[in-house]
Image (spheres, coloured by chain):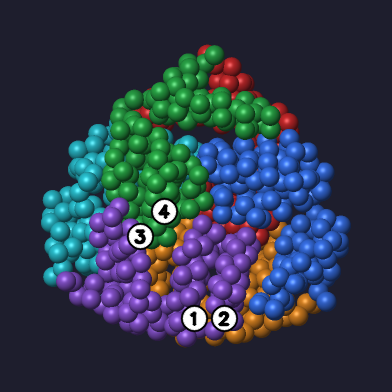
Chain colours: A cyan, B green, C red, D orange, E blue, F purple
Amino acid sequence: MSTALEKGRAWVAEMNPTLEQVLSERYDDLVPEMAETLIEWAYGRHYTRGGVDMKTRQLCTIAALTALGGQTTPQLKINIEHTLAAGASEREIVEIIWQMAVYGGMPAAINGLNAAKEVFQAA
Amino acid sequence: MSTALEKGRAWVAEMNPTLEQVLSERYDDLVPEMAETLIEWAYGRHYTRGGVDMKTRQLCTIAALTALGGQTTPQLKINIEHTLAAGASEREIVEIIWQMAVYGGMPAAINGLNAAKEVFQAA
Amino acid sequence: MSTALEKGRAWVAEMNPTLEQVLSERYDDLVPEMAETLIEWAYGRHYTRGGVDMKTRQLCTIAALTALGGQTTPQLKINIEHTLAAGASEREIVEIIWQMAVYGGMPAAINGLNAAKEVFQAA
Amino acid sequence: MSTALEKGRAWVAEMNPTLEQVLSERYDDLVPEMAETLIEWAYGRHYTRGGVDMKTRQLCTIAALTALGGQTTPQLKINIEHTLAAGASEREIVEIIWQMAVYGGMPAAINGLNAAKEVFQAA
Amino acid sequence: MSTALEKGRAWVAEMNPTLEQVLSERYDDLVPEMAETLIEWAYGRHYTRGGVDMKTRQLCTIAALTALGGQTTPQLKINIEHTLAAGASEREIVEIIWQMAVYGGMPAAINGLNAAKEVFQAA
Amino acid sequence: MSTALEKGRAWVAEMNPTLEQVLSERYDDLVPEMAETLIEWAYGRHYTRGGVDMKTRQLCTIAALTALGGQTTPQLKINIEHTLAAGASEREIVEIIWQMAVYGGMPAAINGLNAAKEVFQAA
């Protein structure tokens, strides 16, 4: 097993313990090794690099997914959960989403706020 | 004068003191009040809201401008300068840019790294 | 109160009288001052600038929201209502949406036509 | 009748025989000649040009619609059907969708896989 | 020859008489019939449809190309020229570009203003 | 060393033998392990998966990078070279680029054709 995959699995074990299994059951029949590839790449090769604390990395992901517009809503919601798990407050999350009105336009920011409301209300 | 405009001007005075004048000379003939509108909106209504520290807000802006792709390179460069001025290290900036490969794709991340290199080398 | 906020409120009073209240009830708990910021910026600082009549400004907004793709559908629908309120016909609105096939691609145009059909049928 | 329109209609007759009628009933009242314009342009002027076989053209369309993100999901689904009709296997389609994680980011690829699952399960 | 191609050529004869020849010399060796396809589609099938006057259609194109971001700068510049030819003033063009800050974000609007400045200064 | 990294390096050895070294010299000081991460992810985890031949995978990459618009021009050019190396003809490449007018809009397709012309003329 690669070190990157090991590091990614360690991250996931802490932040979202069922993630690899959920992905594997949903996608691996269709796309062999999809789950381990995603864990290795996103978490083993990025989130665990160090140099920036996890809460800041997660808020930056929120920023990007908001600015990219409403088409990434499912991923934005999962990352709002990860960002809460990394210690951010609801207030910090919506501040960053709202700031994106400057860079991605008002519709992107409003779609992001709506996603956050849904996550907070379901919690 | 609106409070938002006042707050924006106070932010700009600290982070980039010539910004309003540069914008005004470049755009106000063409688009009356462009400079004060931008200061009021981006800085008076967003960066100065509180709830998130300035360094984190700036890193989130880096994330968004990278994920949006190479078309925002001029704005990415200015914000890399603002992010350094807000106390981030070069390392923190490139970590966030590189993380965007996961969300905006590899080309967006590489274009972002190239913009950062140009800013760091010109400093 | 800023002049821009006053001008924005005057615009909203005519085009969509409950807009600030709706936004405020939906978002201000989460993001303090969201509603007045949006009114000040979008309507006080843009739609009320003059130089272009309101119907043309609204048709240009339809063009942009269509070209940006289906992720801005909720905002496209609200702006289709504003564009009708500004005196445009249904025909003018769909002509502009369809023209966007050239600039944003066929899927964006078709998604825009579907949004228009839903608004027209609900009216 | 233009040659391009004739060529487009011949393509559609083979790949999706009811397409022009479906489009016409849905859109032509609103946007006169929408259906024939789409057939002429997309199929008469592009898919029937030659130089590249139909299966490869269709897989390239899958790639583009995935990379453009979730907002083109309805068009992605129709094109997954056309790509199966052009002789591609389910495996080939999901391989191309998953590859788009490199260029359009992970959320775009995952949204694409979800669209493919829905089409395959409905078949 | 198709009616759409004839109508497109008539439009081009008035607005930009050398366009088809320029496109043909630049692209037809590489992509046979590219020039006539573009004229037929963009101008024969869209700009000449009627229902909206040419100046409004052109301003809507400016809106879309600005909101789509800096990657369409060459096409934005050509369309700024077409929009002036259709009777719009420089002021009207920059008003629409600046309005796009609300929908496409501030970087998109600033890139659009820079494109307009270059066109106006070269005129 | 991970299997994915090994597989990626084998691919690169054949298609673009200096790629890892070029990336490493350009980026690894700034972003440690950037080069090996890119090789592992893009080539070890995607291009070498099998199920689709390399020429088709490369043409699909051309499609995506064209549809994403001019901001990915540097990556489009490198991939046009890889696509020629995978056995595609210039004609096949421009056919796919031009087809993207339907999905990414006319400006994206024209920017893509311009990139292809530059690569072909430099060869």
Q: Amino acid at mark 3?
A: Arg
- Mark 1 or 3: the one toward you: 3
Give the quadrant of the C terminus of chain A. top left
| Residue at 25% across, 34% down | A89
Taking the image as drawn, is residue E73 in sight? yes
Q: Are marks 1 and 4 in contact (CB under 8 Å)?
A: no
- Tell which subunit mark 3 falls on: F
Quickly name the residue at label 4. B114
Separation of residues labelled 2 and 1 (CA atoms): 7 Å
Secondary structure beneath label 1? helix
Q: Is residue D104 above or below residue F19?
A: above
Tell me whether marks 1 and 4 sit on the same chain: no
Q: Separation of disc 2 and disc 4 at Cα?
A: 29 Å
| Distance between mark 1 and mark 4 Cα atoms | 26 Å
The residue that disc 1 covers is F84
Q: In the image, what residue type sits under mark 1?
A: Leu
Q: Pointer 2 and pointer 1: residues touching (CB < 8 Å)?
A: yes
**Picture coordinates of residue A116, whole percent (x, y):** 34, 40
Do marks 2 and 1 share a subunit? yes
